[in-house]
Amino acid sequence: MSYKKQTMYNKGPFASWVPKPVMLILILVILFPMMTISGVYPTTLTDVTGAMATYTEYISLANNAGTIGMGVIFPIAMRLKMRFRSKEIITTSAILLAVLSYMCATTDNPLVLIGCSFMIGFIKFLPIIEMILPVMFMIAPTGDRGKFYAIFYPLSIGFGQLSAYTFASLVFNGSWQAPYFLMSAIMLCIAALSLIFQHNQRFSFKMPLYQVDWLSLALMAVSLMCFNYFLVFMKQQGWFISPAVVGTLIAGVLLFAALIYRQQFLKRKLIDFSALMKKNVIHSIILLLFLGAYLASSSIYSQYSVAVLGYNNLINAQLNLWMIPGIVLSGIMAYFGFKNNWYIKYYIAAGFVSFFLHTLLLYLIIQPYADIRYLAFAMFLKGLGMGILFIGIWFYTSLNLSMQQLLGIMGILIVIRAFLATAIGGAIIGWAGYQAQWQSLNDISAYLDTGDFPNGMAIYQNISLNALMASGKIVLGSMCWLIIPVLIIIATHSYGKFHFKRIVLLRKIIRGNSIKGYRLT
């Protein structure tokens, strides 16, 4: 193939005879199922746990493994794109994903589920990249990241909530295997569509794979899986008493340190860790950790809705659909905000305030009987906060970063946002909820000791539910105070717009000098 033909890939991944409206439909048909497929679907997690008769921690481990797989493949995604044709990538990936999804549906071993989930996350990112690039060009032809994030993130998160409800309905009316069989069939259909409608041209010249540092890739994967085991099994293994928990933490730290050390002496670095030292990236990581704490608080609501209110996974998934209006509103705010150059500081602060109101509302709602309409409004606030922070933090992280730097650290940032932040927040909230529940049981038992109950076990369930609600209120009430340090951190950060005049005026005010005649801006 001549160089001219190799560089003709400028009209998208489909053949020239395909009409443009059909191209758009095909992109959406391929993109959204690829983003949805997973080794574990959150709304069916408890059903899979019960079907496999295993600990919840193993299924959570598999859920996080999918995110780790996406993060691991990110540094080499563009190299793989330039090595293979688009048709080869999508067809092969779809067939492999169909096989892996079928394996998830037919296995009874959680270790197989963990491995398949990691490989699904690893593989599905390649076809996602293939479809995101033409979508990015259609949404923002000039490369405006803000406009792209404002439209793409609400679409992807909203579709995720719709698919979660669909999977919960399939499981409720069928079996826990139904989502896996459905996604396996959809992947085979995507492979057929790829063979029919895609061209055989390359994106660019053929790039070799021998230059990839596979050892660094393995160090990254193994170290992150060690952190995965450490954060997921901390509570179940007795925190730092367990040698397995301590051992995986030490192994994860040592392997990740070896990864960083190895990158310093490579000619072609897999990850440019120097980009992580930039001011905006460090600040974004701090904000992502706070975001993970708020997202992890959903476990308290799940325990309350299932144990106290008696809701099943289908009702909870139906309630989560109220997040979609909030997500859409966050996209509208972002679109007009970036268009009119609004100060991103206030946009990000609005996201955390939405999560604060969501947490406060849940704190006030927790009681033996709750009106489902108030829970719906709480989900709306959660969707608004999630959409704002996903768009705002990601946009601020990408500022002043070259495409090469962004591609190098994006895998790490994806893992931090989707795994480490929520896992760390979940571990802290799990510990706090466990301690608060024991304290609540101890407080209740003080009153029981003063009475005479002929059948004390009859009230055990009510005591447990009361302790669960009390611990939930303690944890959520404590999390409400988290908004104060978060807003202080946001208020004291410049976000790329440092106003020296304001500092001068503030210094004059502190010294007691007059500022009459000065303008603030």
Image (cartoon, rainbow, N blue to C red):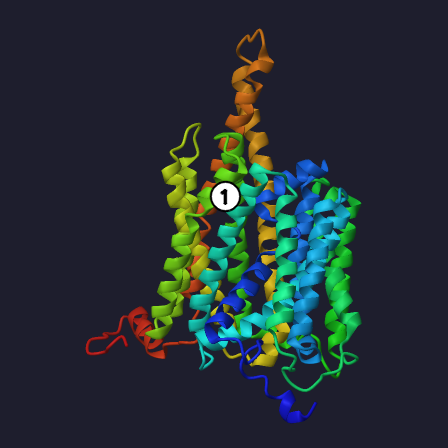
| Image quadrant occupied by the C terminus | bottom left
Q: Mark 1 points at which residue?
A: 317
Q: How crowded is mark 1: few (under 14 residues within 10 Å), some or many (20 or more)?
A: many
State the residue in front, 117 or 262.
117
Residue in the picture at 72% in, 71% down: 260
Quadrant of the image occupied by residue 518? bottom left
Res. 384 in view:
no
Q: Is residue 191 left or right of residue 303?
A: right
Q: Is residue 117 left or right of residue 336?
A: right
Residue 324 x/y as whole percent: 42, 53
Residue 184: x %, y % from top left: 66, 54
Using residue 397 as the reference point, say whether residue 39 is left or right of it.
right
Residue visible at 77% across and 63% down in the picture: 255
Which residue is at the front of the view, 365 or 64?
64
Residue shown at 43% from the left, 61% from the top = 388
Q: In x, y percent, where is residue 174?
A: 60, 38
> Based on the displayed image, in which of its 4 quarters is residue 73 positioned?
bottom right
Q: Position of residue 317 (x, y in %)?
A: 50, 43
Residue 450 position (above or below residue 345) = above
Q: Which residue lies furthest to the left in this view?
A: 517
**Helix, strand or loop status at disc 1:** helix
Q: What is the tally of numbered marks visible in this picture?
A: 1
Q: Name the amino acid type tagged 1.
A: Ala
Question: What's the residue at 75%, 84% (across, down)?
Answer: 267
Q: Can residue 433 be seen in this view?
A: yes
Does 157 sit above or below residue 9? above
